[in-house]
Image (cartoon, grey):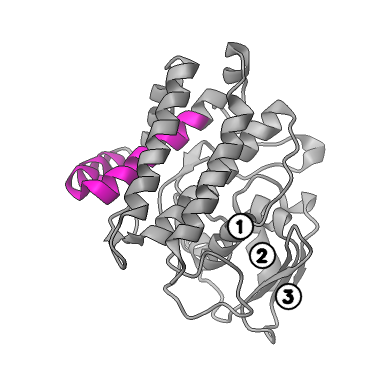
Amino acid sequence: MSDPVVVLDDLRSESEEVDRLVRGLSGEGWAAPTPAAGWTVAHQIAHLAWTDRAALLAVTDPGAFAAEAEKALAAPDRFVDEGAAEGAALAPAVLLERWRDGRERLQRALREAPPGARFPWYGPPMSAASMGTARLMETWAHGQDIADTLGVVRAPTARLRHVAWIGVRARDYAYLVRGIQAPAEPFRVELVAPDGEEWAYGPPGAAQRITGPALDFCLLVTQRVHRDDTALTAEGEDAERWLSLAQAFAGPPGPGRAPAATGHESTGPGRPPAATDGESTGPSPAAPDHESAAPAPQGP
């Protein structure tokens, strides 16, 4: 089990980076359309605030969260968009303060959670470390949409290891939501981290292999880039097929992004990241025998 303190420290750093992107924006900046169809910068932040609130309910008031989850099940195609639209209608200063307050309250709740505690979610229950990892992955992905909108190039950091981990652990889920039988054999994934080190998952001798930059892999599994616009290499038909449908978020598969040459299409607004209770604080030479990834609801 990973150390939730490490994950939560990284989540705080990731949130602060996205905060810096939006804190000085004008009203026009908040209203700027992002690569997620129909979503402005305000929608992106509103979605993060909305999901933080849901996570806080799951940790502090499971009964209230269950009621919210029932609403989501009753309107699976609308509840994410509706939550984002509600927050986006607020004045930017109010929305930003709501996000800041909510994410800090969630930080405190997760840090104070008893060791071994598990919380209800839209999928299987999640530990504090798993919840923090999922929130980091989503914060990074929506932050990428905002950065793309503003023309900002973000330097990749070691925090990407959390995103990569969920992407690897959610492999079978990508097949499941498409009604496809997942390959029985494990894959080997070898990624070059921002500092040049290798993050490796899966047995070294696996015939199906993925290699390449960690940033490209993270962009692909969060569907922020088209497969053709990555430097990832696949060895084996199953490995190549996985790269065409990989997703680290829960919910139905989106259309993904079109190749850069033809312009980007959105995966659709927010969907919750795939939750996982595997090791999330760092890479492992071979993926350990933890629980399999269990996606949860998120944004585009």
Q: Measured from the top left, where is residue 75 in percent x and y?
A: 31, 37
Q: Residue at x 63, y 64 (%)?
A: 242
Q: Measured from the top left, where is residue 52 in percent x and y?
A: 39, 40
Q: Residues within 10 Å of mark 1 (few under 14, many from 20)?
A: some
Cα distance, mark 2 to mark 3? Answer: 9 Å
Asked whether, in this view, residue 235 is left or right of residue 19, the answer is: right
Quadrant location, the N terminus:
bottom left
Q: Main secondary structure of the magenta part?
A: helix
Name the amino acid, label 3.
Answer: Gly
Asked whether, in this view, residue 185 is left or right of residue 231, the answer is: left
Mark 1 highlights which residue?
245
Verify CB contact (< 8 Å) between mark 2 and mark 1.
yes
Name the amino acid, label 2.
Answer: Arg
Q: Residues within 10 Å of mark 2 (few under 14, many from 20)?
A: few
Query: Does the magenta segment cover residue 238?
Result: no
Asked whether, in this view, residue 271 is left or right of residue 54, the answer is: right
Numbered range of the magenta stretch: 45-74
Q: Which mark is residue 80?
A: none
Q: Earlier in the sequence, mark 2 or mark 3?
A: 3
Q: Secondary structure at mark 3?
A: loop
In this rendered view, identify the residue nearer to me: 268 or 163.
163
Q: Residue at x 45, y 47 (%)?
A: 272
Q: Residue furthest left?
A: 63
In this rendered view, identify the residue nearer to me: 237 or 276.
276
Mark 2 highlights which residue?
241
Q: Residues within 10 Å of mark 3 (few under 14, many from 20)?
A: few
Q: Earlier in the sequence, mark 1 or mark 3?
A: 3
Mark 3 highlights which residue?
236
Q: Measured from the top left, where is residue 283 in percent x and y?
A: 61, 70
